[in-house]
Each structure stands twice: as structure tokens, then as C-alpha cells.
Image: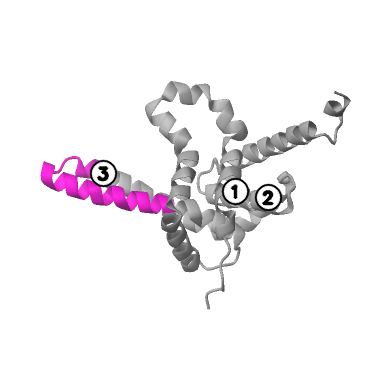
């Protein structure tokens, strides 16, 4: 029983880990509010989580801030590109809704397929960027596509983790509001941790593109 209150006990280490993940989540959430900085926040979150898993240590909020500043340049443009394409595809679906039924089915199927492909690629792009800073956009994009398709069951699990808040917001808004404290305090850092555990073995890139 006395070991339970020992600061070096597994219980207190677990509490310290949860607290640090909460701090990371709040930082990532706040730094994503301008929207255009969300890519840097996501990349920094993945980087500190991956480093923590590799070193078997708790991710540092101070390290997150350094990684966020370092990721602003490399992550912002890809994030804005993915976001613009997602908005374009969703807008296309609204326009397709006014088309004749036969054409609507074919066009909607094509747009939905492109949207899902974009989602799969974006799920892998930022952890790959976090694990391979300095690599070129084209190389990371190609690697994201190959891994997202080749590791499809893991991709589906990652999509479920990251899309859950949005799906609840659309279909169960009352539950989404009731769980607001979860999204703000822990959800995204926990999703980054679980996603990293799923794919960290597949994030290494062989040779830099020349």
C-alpha cells in the first residue's frame, strides 16, 4: 500500500504521463485555432509523441513548442493544400446534388473516392513529416499514399480516431458538446499516441530524394 504513494510508483508515473498529454493536447488545440497553423500543431504533436515512444519517456510540452515553431514552414502549405482540396470535394458534392440522378450517382461516387483517398494520404503525411523532417513534399506524398493503401486496416483505425469528434458533431451534436472537455483536454494527444503506436514501424524513409 505504501508503494502506491511513492512518487516513482507506476501509479504516479501514469498520472504524470496523463497530465503531460493533457498539456500537449491543450497546446495543440490552442495553436490550431487559427486553422492555418493546425498542420504545424499536428506535426509537432506527432514528433514529440514519437520521440517519447522511442525514448520510453513522457513527451515534453517544451519540446512541443520547439517542434511547432520548426514545423510551421514545412507543414503549413501541405495542410492548407489538403484543407482546400477537402473543401473543394465537399463543395462538389453539394453541386452534384442538383444533377440528374444517373449522372449524380457516378459523379458523387468519384468525388467520394477522391475525398477518401485524400483523407488516407493526409493521415500518414504529418506523422511521416514528423519522423522525416527536411524531406521533400513529393517524396512524403508518395510515401503517404503507398503506406495508407498498403496498411489499410491501420489507416481505417487512424481515421476512426481522428474523425470521431467531427462525426459526433455532425450526427450527435448533444453528445459532442457533452464531451467537449474530452476533446480539449486529452483526445487529440491520445489519438496521436495511439496512431503512432500503430504506424511508427513504417515511418522510416529509405533514401532522400535527389
Q: Position of residue 137 (x, y in %)?
A: 49, 65
Query: Which quarter of the figure has residue 7?
Result: top right
Which mark is drawn over residue 13? none
Which mark is drawn over residue 93? 3
- What stretch of residues is rendered in magenta? 93-120
Q: Nearer the viewer, residue 74 or 57?
A: 57
Secondary structure beneath label 2: helix
User: Considering only vertical position in the picture, is 162 above or below 144?
Assistant: above
- Residue that lies at the very extreme toward the bottom in this rendered image: 210
Q: Is residue 150 visible?
A: yes
Residue 140 in the figure: left or right of residue 204: left
Q: Looking at the figure, which quarter contains the N terminus?
A: top right
Q: Position of residue 55 (x, y in %)?
A: 73, 53
State which mark lies toward you, 3 or 1.
1
Name the residue carrying label 2: 53
Q: Are marks 2 and 3 in contact (CB under 8 Å)?
A: no
Question: Residue drawn at (60%, 50%), measured in percent from left and top?
Answer: 46
- Mark found first going from the N terminus, 3 or 1: 3
Which mark is drawn over residue 197? 1
Q: Position of residue 73 (x, y in %)?
A: 57, 59
Secondary structure beneath label 1: helix
Q: Are marks 1 and 2 in contact (CB under 8 Å)?
A: yes
State which mark lies toward you, 2 or 3.
2
- Residue 108 part of the magenta-drawn span: yes
- Mark found first going from the N terminus, 1 or 2: 2
**Within-10-Å neighbours for mark 3: few <14, some 14–19, many 20+:** some
Amino acid at each position: 500500500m505504501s508503494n502506491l504513494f511513492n512518487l516513482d510508483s507506476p501509479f504516479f508515473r501514469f498520472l504524470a504521463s496523463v497530465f503531460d498529454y493533457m498539456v500537449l493536447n491543450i497546446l495543440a488545440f490552442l495553436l490550431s485555432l487559427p486553422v492555418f497553423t493546425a498542420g504545424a500543431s499536428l506535426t509537432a504533436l506527432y514528433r514529440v509523441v514519437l520521440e517519447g515512444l522511442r525514448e520510453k519517456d513522457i513527451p515534453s510540452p517544451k519540446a512541443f513548442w520547439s517542434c511547432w515553431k520548426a514545423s510551421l514552414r514545412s507543414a503549413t502549405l501541405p495542410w492548407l493544400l489538403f484543407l482546400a482540396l477537402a473543401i473543394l470535394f465537399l463543395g462538389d458534392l453539394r453541386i452534384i446534388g442538383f444533377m440528374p440522378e444517373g449522372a449524380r450517382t457516378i459523379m458523387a461516387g468519384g468525388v467520394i473516392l477522391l475525398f477518401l483517398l485524400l483523407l488516407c494520404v493526409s493521415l500518414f503525411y504529418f506523422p511521416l513529416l514528423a519522423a522525416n523532417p527536411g524531406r521533400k513534399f513529393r517524396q512524403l506524398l508518395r510515401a503517404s499514399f503507398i503506406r495508407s493503401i498498403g496498411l489499410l486496416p491501420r489507416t481505417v483505425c487512424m481515421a476512426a480516431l481522428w474523425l470521431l469528434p467531427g462525426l459526433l458533431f455532425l450526427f450527435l451534436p448533444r453528445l459532442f458538446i457533452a464531451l467537449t472537455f474530452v476533446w480539449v483536454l486529452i483526445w487529440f494527444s491520445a489519438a496521436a499516441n495511439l496512431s503512432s503506436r500503430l504506424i511508427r514501424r513504417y515511418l522510416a524513409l529509405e533514401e532522400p530524394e535527389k
